[in-house]
Amino acid sequence: MSSSPFVEWLLIHYASTKSRSPNEGRRRWKLGVAQKFWASGEKTLASTTAASTDKNADFSMDSDPFDEASTNREELGILLRTDFSDEAAWLAFCSRLEEGEKEFALSPLEDDVTTMDDQPDPNKANSNGTPAATAAEDDSDESDDENLPSAIFHIVNPSLPQERALLTNISNLAALRLFNDVDIRQAPTLPPDTKRIRPPNRLVDSGGWQEVYVGKNLWIYDAKSNSDQCVRVVSQTSSDMYGTATADSWRARVSHICELQINLSSGAMKIDFGGLDRWDYTERQRNMREAEAPESS
């Protein structure tokens, strides 16, 4: 991001961070630099490095252990299974997801997408299973449909005990740090007569900056999914509304997530709940605690 000083921090600190932990991978090395950023009192750095340098820099080109399940996949989104207690419920979910992908391939999204007015509860979908969203007409629907991958989601469902332990009951923030790359941007504009959050938190606003993530959308199947057949839809940044947070989430039914993912990937939809704060507050608090915990990166 042009407004972020993080690229300059990566140019200066990435190599030394990498050399101290050579086996970790790109995402962990970048998180290490982000930790330095947040710990520093001075966030901006004087730099004469050309803006294009970062495109071929190691922090853009290095590999990561989780690239095979994210960056290197052709699917648009990543669906993580984080609860392994009910195999029948999981198989039912997967069956409905497969049906949804097939249905979407046969009946692509209609051109006429409108703004939805109903505001759903963050813990359940509204009457038609979709969130309040701002949608824009996409003139390239036909060409986009031709370029759709055979599957919309890459499903991460580990079988090894140690791999399952890594994902079991994982937070939104921890999942983003595994499958997305960290970045830092300016926090949303503070509305008039509004005080900054206290204490500061990097997922919302810390010194006017905010930690965000770049990569494929994450959808998390958790313990509650066994009963409601919904997943957590994880945000990579806060919404434009001040006070919302990176890694916020809400629940969406399996029958609607294919259409949602296509719309999110194409830019035809932006989740904003009509300007209201409808994200899952419990998950937000969990993420914010983890973000500011010692050695959180």
Image: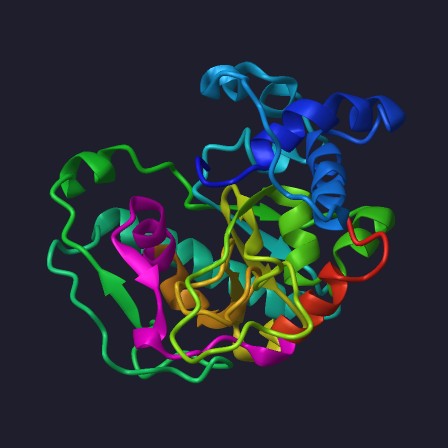
Q: Position of residue 260 (x, y in %)?
A: 35, 59
Quick one: 162 or 100, which is closer to the camera?
Answer: 162
Colour convention: rainbow
State how many labels appear: 0
Q: Position of residue 36 (x, y in %)?
A: 76, 41
Residue drawn where x is 84% and y is 23% of the image:
22
Is 4 positioned to the left or the right of 152 in the image?
right
Q: Nearer the viewer, residue 68 or 44?
A: 44
- Residue 86, compared with residue 80, is above or below; it is below
**Residue 58: x %, y % from top left:** 65, 18
Is residue 129 among the parts visible in the rendering? no
Residue 108 seen by the camera: yes
Q: Quadrant of residue 29?
A: top right
Magenta range is: 259-283
In this rendering, the answer to whether 115 lies above or below 291 is below
Instruction: Decide which of 154, 52 is in the foreground and name it.
Output: 52
For residue 20, which quarter of the picture? top right
Q: On the rendered structure, is 6 left or right of 104?
A: right
Describe residue 133's horizontal placement relative to residue 158 as left or right: left
For the point 73% across and 28% down, the residue is 13
213 left or right, relative to 158: left
Expressed as whole percent of the image width and height from the top left, the position of residue 140 reads 15, 39
* Magenta-span inclusion, residue 268: yes
Q: Is residue 158 magenta?
A: no
